[in-house]
Amino acid sequence: MAGTLYGIGVGPGDPDYLTLKAIKCMEKVDIIAAPGKVVEETTAYKIAVQAAPFIEEKEKAPIFMPMVMDRAKMEDAHRDGAAAVIKLLEEGKDVGFLTLGDTTIYSTFSYIEKIVKEGGYNTVYISGIPSFCAAAAEVGVPLCEWTEPLHVIPAVHKLDEKLPANGNYVLMKSGSKMAQVKEILRESRDNVSMVENCGMPDQKVYHSIDEIPDDAGYFSLIIAK
């Protein structure tokens, strides 16, 4: 009987954010996989092993995912990664694929899972605490209240204009264009905060647009109300 692929969300950075369900899943799987050349060097693994040190003894399966914007190259990488997982499943092994934050939000796992599932194999999503929920808690602000809508936008700098709708915004994956993002925010939102490297030892919190540096890192998340 073929094994099952589990996508395990490990949260944004603080190992205390790992759920009991995630830890129980890591206990029962045969193999720990992660998107990188070396599993132990991935951010997701470094977070998970602090809360679940027993995974050090588990078999590891690196699933290399190049950080490129070429859609064709990424799709090739997803197919290669899925093929590597399927090979392990065919051996009857359960695979736990670690991913930052939540497995359903801009996660590498979702691309791998779709291909594996289409191949007729069992797959399971194990939810994790999303980065923007943890960031809101760190800043000390609610993401939305009453009837306020919440919009989650990746790469907002590509809009080249004001934020298009009413409500509150979570802006992800905009660190490389932060100066441009700040100008968009100045024209459209009053209450802006940002958390860089949420839950990690080098976490930084900013409470206004003026505090946010133009050279913010990749793991920078903005909450705009």
Image (cartoon, rainbow, N blue to C red):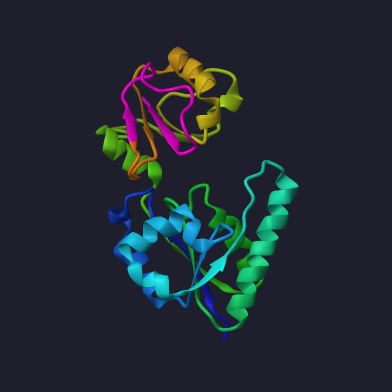
Report whether residue 44 is seen: yes
Residue 170 lies in quadrant: top left
Answer with the quarter of the image where residue 223 lies: top left
Residue 180 placement, left or right of 118 = left
Residue farthest to the bottom, as pictured? 1
Q: Position of residue 44 (x, y in %)?
A: 44, 55
Can the viewer see residue 163 in this picture? no
The part of the chain drawn in magenta is 204-225
Image quadrant where residue 9 sits: bottom left
Q: Is the stretch drawn in magenta largely helix, strand or loop?
A: loop
Q: Give whichever of 162, 11 is nearer the camera.
A: 11
* Viewer-closest of 88 and 51: 51
What's the residue at 66%, 71% (across, down)? 119
Q: Is residue 118 left or right of residue 225?
A: right
Instruction: State the quadrant of the C terminus.
Output: top left
Q: Position of residue 100 (x, y in %)?
A: 45, 52
Magenta highlight on residue 161: no
